[in-house]
Amino acid sequence: MPMPALLRAMMVCSALFVGLAVAQDYAEQQRKAAALLDALDAGQYEAARADFDAAVSESLPAERLRQVWESLPQQLGASTGRGPAHPEQINGLSAVVTPLHFSLASLDALVTFDNEDRINGFRLVPGKPPQPTVAPAPQNAPFSEHDVTIGAEGSSLPGTLTMPRGDGPFPAVVLLAGSGPNDRDESIGPNKPLRDMAYGLATQNIAVLRYDKRTHARPQDFAAGNYTVDDEVISDALAAAKLLRKTRHIDRRHVFVLGHSLGAMLAPRIAAQDKRIAGLILLAPPARPLQDAIVDQMTYLASIDGTFTSDERTAIDTVRKQSERVRALQTGDTPAADTLPLNLPASYWFDLKDYDPVATALTLTLPMLVLHGGRDYQVTAAEFARWQQASWADDSKVSPRVTLTDYPRLNHLFMAGDGPSTPAEYAQPGNVDVGVIADIANWIHAQ
């Protein structure tokens, strides 16, 4: 799960705004937006709320602002300053958009206003990349890249098909990113693990389809706040596999799904709905409930410096209580999203509440390759052990249906390093280990 928990919450819920009217005085709005951010930077969280309207004031108390704001440097690295603010119209509201730059990533602070210049919405969303998401393929590469669209017209997602040169037919794989509103490369800091996968596999005569997640490309699709992992991931993955099977030079009998982190966790559900999928490649597949993983990740991050501050303990206790609410959910319950982990709606948690990826994988008969980085703190060694200890029923004495491999020096992004892994590691440029890509390619060609 490449994005830390609290940041994912802000990103997934980025399309929700309060208020109806449009303000006209941009200079005054810019002043108030800057005053809000200045107060947050100064730790003056009550003062930051000075221009909130009643609804935002109720939904964003000072303590909530403090938890979010003080978590950002830990999750995204040190602040490197703000970019110039600019006006936008968002869902009919007048807004001031201010880029916030950190060493690992950038966010946009969206502040919307009513017709009396009161702040009626405040959200942090992924910053717009300074360059196009898709860089051109390297010159003289043994593959070509083509723009494609995933899903129905009017709500489709942009994607890239990386095709080996030649007539094929080639085996093909759909790439699924981890949690959060990831682009098709699963960009985090300077790293693009899914692009590494696409280039590496295409070089070994495997076609690759990757695409922007719906939460990245179409956050407006989640504005109603009542959605599930089917809406976020599964429906689009099924459409992507279908598209590959209809594409020239693709071997329709050998279309695979490769999921990373959350994508790996959901891959067994995808395969259960599409019997034509030839096999699954699961990179860092979680084996514990998502709400428990969030608590454990926050605890790990807080422990990196060897101490727990009172603020860190309070934040962990808050998330632990939210996790307990998920376990206690009963049919008909409609708790507010801000009382649940990541600010995700109850519908999302109901959908995942009884889902066990290992148990679901055990019901499948297709081949699977399960890979884990030994230094991964987000999907732990204990989780990988559960995959290893599952009662896999091999359907061939010569070639076991399920292959499991651990790479001791690799982190959650399958990039090499030494010592305990931390979020700061993701800020260092790297590439997916070539041995991992070779193992995946060899496994696909052997099926």
Image (cartoon, grey):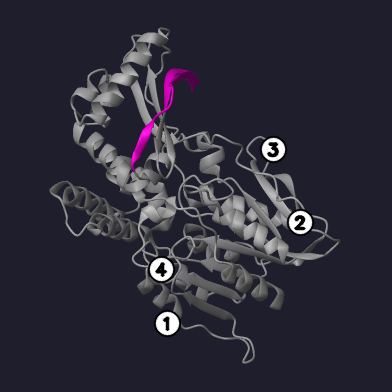
Label 2: which secondary element = strand
The residue to which callout 3 is attached is 153
Q: What is the spatial separation of the Cα atoms under label 4 and label 1, in whole angstroms?
A: 12 Å
Which of marks 2 and 1 precedes in the sequence? 2
Which of marks 3 and 1 precedes in the sequence? 3
Q: What is the spatial separation of the Cα atoms under label 3 and label 4, in whole angstroms?
A: 35 Å
Three-letter amino acid code at the position of disc 1? Gln
Q: What is the spatial separation of the Cα atoms under label 1 and label 3, in whole angstroms?
A: 44 Å
The answer to whether 358 is drawn above or below residue 142 in the figure is below
The residue to which callout 4 is attached is 287
Dominant secondary structure of the magenta stretch? strand
Nearest-to-viewer mark from 1 and 3: 1
Label 1: which secondary element = helix
Three-letter amino acid code at the position of disc 4? Ala
Mark on residue 302?
A: none
Query: Which quadrant of the figure has residue 298?
Result: bottom left
Label 1: how many Cα within 10 Å (few below 14, some 14–19, many 20+): few
The residue to which callout 2 is attached is 143
Q: Which residues are magenta?
A: 78-98
* Residue name at image x 58 percent, y 71 percent: 435
Three-letter amino acid code at the position of disc 2? Phe
Where residue 189 sits: x, y (%)? 47, 47
Which of marks 4 and 2 precedes in the sequence? 2
Where residue 322 sits: x, y (%)? 26, 50
Label 3: how many Cα within 10 Å (few below 14, some 14–19, many 20+): few
- State left or right for residue 39 relative to residue 215: left
Is label 2 in contact with label 3 (beta carbons under 8 Å)?
Answer: no
Q: Is residue 86 magenta?
A: yes
Mark on residue 389?
A: 1
Where residue 384 sits: x, y (%)? 42, 73
